[in-house]
Amino acid sequence: MLLISMVGCSFFSSPRSDRRKHCEKSIRAVIRIHDPKKSLHSGQESLILYFVASVQHSATARTALSMSYLSLVKPLSHLREAQEHPDEIVLETVGVSFQRGAVSEISGRASSGKTGSTLVLLAQLTAAGEICAVVDGTGGFDPSTAAQAGVELANLLWIRCGGDVERSFLSADHLVQAKGFGAIWLNLSGLPMQKLRLVPRTYWYRYRTQIKETPTIFVVTSSEPLAGSAANKSFEMSREKAAWSGAGSFKLLREFHLKIASRKHYYEPPIHTKAEFDHTEN
């Protein structure tokens, strides 16, 4: 798994003519590759890449940063755009499908199944050898949980944005430009909705335009729908009830019963599914 932690970078005192060189030098200086057996927690594999992702006060430096970023992402993702992929990925265990080359969104409150459903998608794609990316807005992505769900961490790019809305959208924009990913997951759950509502709709249409005719599935998860008409599919998930096992004070959560409603096809009946929990030790 490749982990990118977003770090702010500004050029208050650098002359404009030197900012491009300063930016490239900063990028080279901040990249450190660690031994995964010594530096990562259990379940997190491969290497960590710390990358300067936000440049303030300079459009020139921001452009140079973007190009340097893409030059790193493309070879690391092993892009094979000529490879044939099915146009639609069906998640049989969940009961929904996602279209390649389109934006899909899943909205719902906490513990409504958004993360679990997206992990099923990532597990299916990474198991087939496709490279996927996670733009983690608030640090809610857990590699151990993803690995237990079947996600191949060696085929995953993880970008942590530290709760910054702008960095989250900028990171997703860079990944969409790189093309060739099996799926890009923009996880906005936990970010302030008042800030997310201020994001211009042009961002979503930009994603839709750039991802068109590519093999990438662009998935957005948040507590409320955000993409509007830019989304090809929009699902609203809710938890109906929880089932427990055991008696007295020693109960264990056995399963969630979930409802998935399509916001694009109002007359279709909602999908009822469940998320089961395995408490046995591996």
Image (cartoon, rainbow, N blue to C red):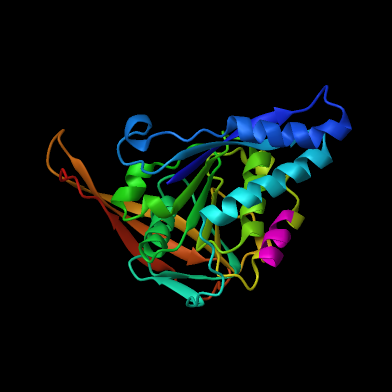
- Estimate the x, y position of residue 150 in percent, counting from the top left: 31, 56
Does residue 90 appear in the picture of this structure?
Answer: yes
- Decide if residue 81 is on the left or right side of residue 114: right
Q: Is residue 218 above or below residue 278?
A: below
Residue drawn at the location 46% of the way across and 38% of the way down: 48
The foreground one among 146 and 48 is 48
Farthest top residue?
A: 13
**Figure quadrant of the C terminus:** top left
Magenta stretch holds residue 74: no
Residue drawn at the location 72% of the way across and 62% of the way down: 205
Residue drawn at the location 59% of the way across and 48% of the way down: 72
- Estimate the x, y position of residue 231 in percent, counting from the top left: 62, 65
- Estimate the x, y position of residue 46 in percent, counting from the top left: 39, 44
Which secondary structure type mostly characterizes the magenta part of the structure?
helix
Residue drawn at the location 53% of the way across and 68% of the way down: 80
Q: Is residue 244 above or below residue 75?
A: above
The foreground one among 156 and 103 is 156
Magenta stretch holds residue 207: yes
Give the residues drawn in magenta, as a range: 203-210
The foreground one among 89 and 131 is 131
Q: Quadrant of residue 90?
A: bottom left
The foreground one among 11 and 205 is 11
- Estimate the x, y position of residue 17 in percent, counting from the top left: 87, 34
- Decide if residue 122 is on the left or right side of residue 199: left
